[in-house]
Image (spheres, rainbow, N blue to C red):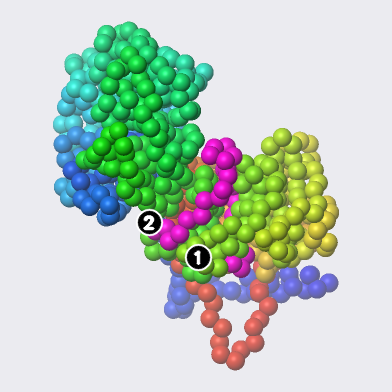
Amino acid sequence: MAMKLLASALSALILTAPTFAEAARKGAPTLPPALELSRIRGGAVVAQPIVNGTRVYIPTGRVLATWDYAQPNTPLRVATSKAAGGAINGLTRQGNYLYASWRGYDGSSGVATYSLADPARPKLVSDSDAYVEGESKFVVGLAAANGHLWLFDNNNGLFVSNLADPANPVFVPTAITSGVDQYNKIIPSGNTIYATGRNFVSASVLDIYDVSNPAAPVRIAEHTVDGFDSFSLSPQPGLAIGVGNQLSVFDLTDPEEMTRRSFIDIPPATRGVRAGSFFYTFGYGEGMDLWNIANLDAPAAAGHLDIDALGGHTAVKIGTTLLLQTDTDLLHGIDISTQAAPVRRTTGWLPGGVGARDIAMHGGRVVLLQPNSGLTVNDRAALTPYSRFEAHLPQSLQARSFEQLVVAGDTAYMAAWGYGLINVDLSDPAHPVELGRVEFPFAAVLDVKGDYAYLGKWTNGGLFAVADVSDPAAPSLVWQGELLAQPYRLKVDKQQLYIAEGQDSPGSGGLRVLDLTNPASPAPLGHLDDGCGTAFDVSIDSAVSLAYLACSNGMQVIDIANPATPVVVGRYDAGSSADYTRVAQRGNRAWFTNLDGLHELDVSDPTAPVLRKLTSIGHQGAERVSLLPDDSLYVLGGGTGVHVFKTPLRAPVKPSGARQAAPARPALRKR
């Protein structure tokens, strides 16, 4: 009866409220403006940085970060560019311009052009995806050679621009329309371009292009080598060095013939860089190994540098400093003035990280979950890291893979796919330290309430677990049960736990509800799949008992006043279908993400969400969408970086001496 009365009263509230037009005519405040993107930080460093004097341009996610190494021991990050259309995967320089190729996950690709009129602050002057028609673009990189710009597309072949207008390059197709592999390194040398990567059978490839005649480029060689012995290749004129389980020297004196002339077994590595007569290998395990290649027919071990090089990805030389960037969010400056004895000069932390997956706020600072290391505590203004916590786990990215984060009080709870639950003390934010941990391999989802943490996994069988965290220093598993389908998000509200569930078996998908009357022993309570299928995220508006569910084709608003029988009361059709959609909600706003971007929705009437604005987030799905207490909306794009939006939301002002009214809940009807 009480529910009916509440619904009736709120129905009247909606019916009697003035329309926006009426409110405007009467001088009442109009609808607040849509949100705007304020900054992007971080993202994957895929392309090789470009050195320009004492400056280096590092492509991180969708932006270029300019670092000044005039003082190698105290490098300074001086600027961040405007964003390219997607995550940058190639970077090259021709004259006073930088050209960045980018690719989305929706068949989009393009080239962004940056002017170096002010070398300290590259300025975005154009960004175009018009090099070819269609929706199956797959750019893998680009290179400047012989006064032209060359664009490589895995699906459409090789394109060239004569740079007649260098600020707005126009591309035309070449006769090479197929055979472009998924290169991860494209190196120009005079009129030759070396393109290397890995193919679909995990072999390493090296293709060589002669571009001496820009009107008729020729692919003069297609080489393939074992992808385990040589996980990656570093080519140069007449030579290529492979790094993997071995260090191999390949002869390219005749570019059409690639012959291995020597090799040596080495500790596994994924990347390498040459420094004079030495070759440094890194990336897979601990440290950086040195190899003397003065005699190319007999490479020999030459030492080891104890440095955190796990996930080492790109390495460039700037003077006598080697910059080594890692997928654990580090940027090392290594003194190689004595190439046989490199010394670490500096280690910096990349703002935003290379692929932040989750976010929370603690003490006015932003806490970012970094997938390959642990977490960083960052200032809000620029996401500059204030402190960093790296979990003590094996030197393997697979043994880490942090998935989700919850901060409660002074404790950060982290779900690590490679281990389980790891708890971190943030009471001294400058020095986060581990409190305790409990094994739960393949942990993927997490929420915490009171004395209990709730975890779920799907790898090697679905399993749900409850951990007692009343003492975060000594967590323990107290309950485990099977899951019917893959969990993508857990959310505890009141005495219920809500699961955004995959559709992996009959009777699964949508929203699943567990009863937490006994918080240490969850019990089935309710389930709803009303056209959602696989659900990827859920946000709860506890005050009015509504759940916002992210489905592949859009968002559903669900009445959970009776959690045993949830009912869909509103829908938003996103117009396209995609995996790994995300949702967040507060007040009269909800935000939904898919490959098309960030959908800002007016949910003043939750039965009829209305699109206010669609903003691109780089043609990729988001890892997380979260509205923090400062009313900033954070969209974590993984490889595209952390997108920060300032919302128009304002906390309601409570009149002095007034009684606080119960939160208004709109009348709901099934849709």
Q: Nearer the viewer, residue 570 or 52?
A: 52
- Name the kind of residue labelled 1 in the image: Pro
The answer to whether residue 584 is above or below residue 31 is above
408 with respect to 260 (left or right)? right
How many other residues sit within 10 Å of disc 2, few (<14), some (14-19) or many (≥20)? some
Residue 576 in picture, x, y percent from top left? 54, 40
The local secondary structure at tag 1 comes to: loop
Q: Secondary structure at mark 2?
A: strand
Going from N to C along the chain, the mark reached first, 2 or 1, is 2
Q: Can I make out residue 313 in this image?
A: no
Q: Which residues are magenta?
A: 384-410
Residue located 80% across and 73% down the image: 2
Task: Give the side of residue 436 with respect to residue 137, left or right.
Answer: right
Query: What is the count of numbered marks?
Result: 2
Nearest the viewer among 54 and 176 is 54
Point out residue 59 in the picture as x, y percentages from the top left corner: 34, 42
The numbered dot on residue 39 is 2
The N terminus lies in quadrant: bottom right
* Residue in view at x 17 percent, y 50 percent: 118
Numbered tag placed on residue 335 in the rendering:
none
Q: Nearer the viewer, residue 150 or 194?
A: 194
Q: Is residue 611 toward the left or the right of residue 565 in the image?
A: left
- Residue 517, picture quadrant: bottom right
Number of residues whose C-alpha sits closer than 10 Å to that of mark 1, classed few (under 14), some (14–19) or many (20 or more): some
Asked whether disc 2 touches disc 1, contact meaning CB atoms under 8 Å apart, the reply is no
As drawn, 296 above or below 284? above
Is 670 in front, or is 246?
246
Question: Quick check: is 408 in the magenta stretch?
Answer: yes
Q: Residue at x 53, y 64 (%)?
A: 361
| Residue lying at 62% horizontally and 59% vertically, measured from the top left | 435
Look at the image and tell me whether residue 324 can be seen. yes
Residue marked by disc 1: 429
